[in-house]
Image (tube, rainbow, N blue to C red):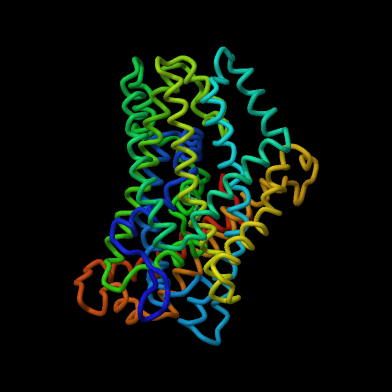
Amino acid sequence: MADIQTGRDSFSSKFGIIAATAGSAIGLGNIWRFPYVAGENGGGAFLLVYLIFVLAIGIPVMLSEFTIGRGAQLNAFGSFRKLKPGQPWYLIGLMGVAAAFMILAFYTTVAGWTLEYIYQSLINGFSGKNPEQLHSMFESFTGGSWRPLIWYALFMGFTGFIIVAGVKNGIEKYTKILMPVLFILLLVLVIRAVTLPGAGKGIRFLFQPDFSKIRASTILEALGQAFFSLSIGMGTLITYSSYIKKHEKLGQTAVFVALTDTSVAVLAGLAIFPAVFAFHIEPASGEGLAYITLPNLFQQIPGGYLFSLMFFFLLGVAALTSTISVLEVIVAFFSEELKMTRKAATWTATLSVSILGAMCVFSTSLMANVHIFGKTVFDLLNFTSANILLPLGGFFIVLFVAWFYGTEKTKRELSNNGTLKARYIPLFIFIIKFLAPIAIAFVFLQGVGLIKLS
Ligand code: PHE
């Protein structure tokens, strides 16, 4: 429903805001990426560092995006231009739109794989296969071209279908249904995993910090993971918060969403590690953890057929509520800045992203030999967006709010024009002035290889 004053669509309820924003944050980053990154970086030790970053840097960056988005009530590009006219800050918004193109292309590729795996779960396609066979099953699927492309297109189609319906009747309506489904599925999977005989080892692995495993690279990996998982640094949350009404509490929303996102990462770890350890599988098995290791596991546990179906469906749902948030960044930009209708914006965005998307899909087949800067298109987009664009975007977003937009305006936005106490504001301002930019600069320089720490 359009807002009377601005003529813009907006979220109609508190639950809608939470479902949409948490839906953006919770995704492949939590369920596919977090467990294997934690597994490779020492389990509990990684989790601890990750938690510190979410609290000390993630929430402040998120809140900075909320300040910009709700303050300006425009897309990421338009928001910067409105808040600081005549200065090139809108380039940060433009960089966010570029990052959205890149993330959507490779992310939807991985999301498409979940559809294949839902299908394989349905037809009992993993049955009777040993780990090597499951490995080659994954390789031959991603090594084909048409099949992954069709799943990609279907997933992109679902994403466009929700986005074209608008903020309230699309994003809010679907995330309000999908997020509770996601939680129920996840809880069932966690209960299954932690009640397996021998689960204790996996639980200890996730929660018992082994500080000898913490090195500089672990710390930086944790910060990158926090950015990606919280959907910060590229204007997704600027765009979403531009649909939040002026009486809603931004501080509370940011804290709740960040903690929910983190809980889901921990729950995903609890759904996976106890089972992985109970069956003596190596925890640090990289990107294949979800697509190779888990089907192997589902073969061995009672009720595996159903759990496999639930797991990949959960992964697909989590991915969908994230892909819509990325597409919305582009669609809001196209419709507000290029004056397209929402329909034209949605399908133009979907089709143009898909040119890059097809290249990502083909990165493991037809274009496996095409390397740019030594990387396949998929790896290049994944690397550039997560390690370069998000930290860079996050860095400028906090600098903008702390030093250029102005403390007074920030206070006014976060306290809803002085009607809320919002006692956290001085701490928040201190963090975004000093701690957050320094820490982010650190991860960025490491990401691009300008400094090298172990
Ligand atoms: N946060 C999402 C996830 O964890 C991915 C994402 C990144 C979404 C950036 C929007 C923007 O899967």
* Quarter that holds the C terminus: top right
User: Residue 413, how many percent across, how many down?
Assistant: 32, 76
Residue under the point 61% across and 49% down: 382
Residue under the point 30% across and 74% down: 246
User: Residue 24, how many percent across, how many down?
Assistant: 44, 53
Q: In this view, does 195 lie to the left or right of 93?
A: left
* Residue lying at the far bottom of the rendered structure: 86
Q: How many labels does the image show?
A: 0
Q: Can residue 21 be seen in this view?
A: no
Quadrant of the rendered structure where residue 425 is? Answer: bottom left
Nearest the viewer among 165 and 401 is 165
User: Residue 235, how many percent across, how many down?
Assistant: 49, 65
* Quarter that holds the N terminus: bottom left
User: Residue 117, how many percent across, how many down?
Assistant: 55, 30
Q: From what the image shows, is residue 389 above or below residue 313?
A: below
Nearest the viewer among 316 and 256 is 316
